[in-house]
Amino acid sequence: MKIKKIAALLYAFTAFAALSVTTVSCDDNKSYSELLEEESKAVNRFLVDQKVVGHIPADSVFEIGPDAPYYQIDEDGNIFMQVLNKGTGPKVKDDQAVSFRFTRWNLIFYNTKDGLQYPEGNADDLSRDDAIFRYGNFTLPSSVTWGSGIQTPLAFLNLGCEVNLLIKSQYGWNTELSYVQPYLYHVRYFPTILNN
């Protein structure tokens, strides 16, 4: 009988904890669907000022440069990539350690008049270490932290590439998933000497 009471208490506690997490993750008492709608509006507000191509080029030859279009990378429109430099290094291998330096902007704060605001990242601060992930390996906390979206350009480009990358929350950092916030990243990728 005690085991049933303990199990019932554990179940009730778990349900309460799950409800608490759900409530906390919803900003200003907004529902998850309202947050997704807000995220989509922020992405559209940014993309309306850009040239956008709704697919990856069939030959995987991307236009390059600051005036290049943003390519929709996935069919659901969660990741868009503008190629600034295709990279001159080799193609990345599965489980290879990759360093990257980035600046990112929360697109919730984007507006046409003021542009991108509140940058954060390690790109301009050499006292900060490179960020590192292992390509395609999402069993390691170091890779999971960054989300899968940050790795996406390396499926098409070489190491040494530089991109602008729009990532919706589902493919971003764990915090973007919780708060449903899209980010624009300016990213440069490098091979790292860590146990390749």
Image (spheres, rainbow, N blue to C red):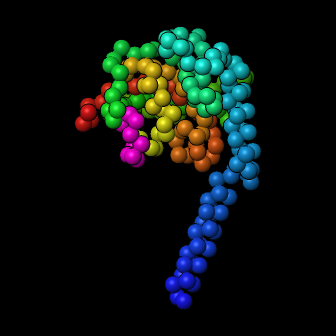
> Of residues 163 and 54, which is closer to you in this image?
54
Q: Residue at x 26, y 33 (%)?
A: 196
Counting from the top left corner in percent of width and height, residue 106 is at 61, 35
- Is residue 136 found left or right of 66 in the rendered image? left
Residue 182 point in image, percent of width and height: 62, 35
Residue 34, placed above or below residue 2? above
Magenta region, residue range = 132-142
At 58% from the left and 28% from the top, the residue drawn is 74
Q: Residue at x 68, y 37 (%)?
A: 39
Q: Can see residue 114?
A: no
Residue 38 picture quarter: top right
* Residue 126 shown left or right of residue 9 in the figure: left
Residue 100 in view: yes
Residue 174's place in the image compared with 88, above or below, is below
* Image-based side of 84 in relation to 48, left or right: left
List x then y, in percent, for residue 23.
68, 58
In magenta segment, residue 133? yes
